[in-house]
Image (cartoon, rainbow, N blue to C red):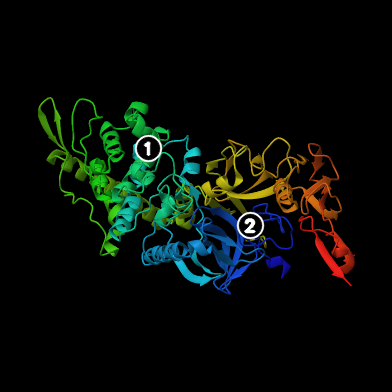
Amino acid sequence: MGENKLCLGCMDRKGAASICPHCGYEEGSSYLPSYIEPGTTLNNRYMVGKLLSSNGEGATYIGYDTVITCKVVIREYMPENLCSRVKGKPIISVNYNHLAQYKALMAEFTELNKSLAKMRTLSHIVPALDLFSENNTTYAIYEFVESISLIDYLKENAGELSWEQVSKLFPPLFTTLGIIHNTGIIHRGISPNTIYYTPKGELKLMEFCVSGVRTANTELVSEIFQGYAAPEQYSLSSRQGTWTDVYGICAVLYRILTGCMPTDALSRMDNDNLCPPHEINTNVPKNISMVIMDGLKLIGRERVQTITELVTRLFEQVDSHAKGYTATIIIPKSKLDAVMKEEKRNKNAYMAPTVDYDDVYEDEIDGTEVTQQSSLERIKAAVIIGVLLLAILMVIATILLNVFNGEGTEKIKSDVDSFSSLDNVVTVTSATEDITTEETEITTTIKTDSLMPNLIGKSFEIQKSAHAGWITLDPIYEYNNDYESGLIYDQEIKEGENFASGSTVKVWVSKGSENVSIPSFSNLKIDDYLQKLAALGIRYEQKPEENYNYQNGYVTRTSKEPGSTINVKNGDILVVYYAENPEITTVITNESAKNTESDGQGDSVIVVD
């Protein structure tokens, strides 16, 4: 079974290796005791891996479905302000004073995921696949989607995108958000950190939470995304609605088009100096800039109210950016088809503005009206098509004539070979058969069609996702003193060299420096200090000792002084000593007990006759 062993860091097969060759996760790595121990099985089906993230609502883990045999994401309801983990067990212990709040919020968590599960046909969210109760709480299981956050995608694209790119990328997400709003669900956390980009070039909105997490001053630890949260999310008395998500999505558009995060709402309420996008980036059309600013108004009732209204204004505006004339911009049919594709499958979907595709642009240049497609242009198009058809027929006729004139299959073969040269993937050519030989020589030529990008100094995980389907990265993990852990420091095919799309390319990924500074243990319990060592990759051995200068469980000393270095590559072990002092017991007789007063210090006293 060793060859099929799963890595609890990424849930890929790692075999018998102690360090995963895919993600670098080391078997037996320490974990925070507030969360589930990796390797735990839930509902007799889902294996829990390492912690991915957490917020005031709960914790998210990578997981594995042992029935379907695939990766999943596990979300555990665990509001840390209202409950705690039983030590050494996955069971949740609820604070009795917060029991009513705990149950109410768990019901909201369950209903939210039930509602999302009913929208599985929407391809731009990740709905719950399973819901169950265990360990005094509720778990939601989601599909695992290979993706990177939008903020990481922007880092790979010079920090910003053009409006042309945005207008192609975002419409399906707008549609999905509109459908979700029609079911009464408000996200409240739309930001580049909760929108993800997939290798298919699609956006997915993730990380839906109960409302209390995305509102300040509730009983939960709030998760408010500065710069993207609407003003009403900072006050319990303010109404929230679809306009709250409009603020978030407009803030995301602002960030994408300008490369700058918008000023957070609290600061704007004191001094609103937010510049329109077109003043920061002149390539942003002024009408688009104006719509975004209307979606970022501080007063909710003055803001763009719905996604429907936002889409209408973004794609049916007057283009004031063009020079010399004005023209009405109409949404292209191909774009609108993509936007409305999912709407037609959902009876509650909002309908985007109706567009008459037979309409034409009417441009005014020096007072003269010009139609987009005149009769003369139609005639020209017909002539061009006719000429092309005639040329194709002549080529076919020439080939057939050569066949009947005796040039035979060899001539056809050369013609086919000339066309196949346009194929940049793989071409296989065969030498002419010689009837006097027994073997046919076959030469395979793999034609390169791509230039290798520079991967050095970049995150392996981000590059792996960003280039999926184009380049398969094969990581080799080694210690490197010049690069932080997880960064690529060398690549098999150098930058600018030719390669074939789909190739597997070896990359060397840093595991961090081999010489690590030993951290201080001052006033730390043994468990807390061992977690620090594990995070640094330092191997350790713990030993108890009597030392009444320290409380039981606290670190007393280490085999090497803090501040000195230890070589983790060689597997050097740091011995950590901690106080384990026996309890002082006083034995006295009944007679002497009569003359002894307790000092009140809490030492154990045994009285014998």
Q: Mark 1 points at which residue?
A: 265
Instruction: Identify the amino acid type marked 2.
Output: Gly
Q: In this view, does 545 lie above or below 321?
A: below
Query: Residue at coordinates 85% horizontally, 64% vertically from top-left?
Result: 593
Front of the two marks 1 and 2: 1
Which amino acid type is shown beneath numbered disc 1?
Ala
Q: Which of 590 and 489 is in front in this view?
A: 590
Q: Residue 247 carries which label?
A: none
| Residue 259 visible (yes or no) | yes
Label located before the other in sequence (1 or 2): 2
* SS of the residue under disc 2: loop
* Residue 532 image offset from top left, x and y in percent: 71, 47
Residue, x 84% and y 54% (percent of image)?
A: 543
Quadrant of residue 59 within the rendered picture: bottom right
Q: Is residue 335 left or right of residue 527?
A: left
**Residue at horizontal 50%, vertical 48%?**
148
Q: Is residue 205 visible?
A: no
Q: Mark 2 points at which residue?
A: 9
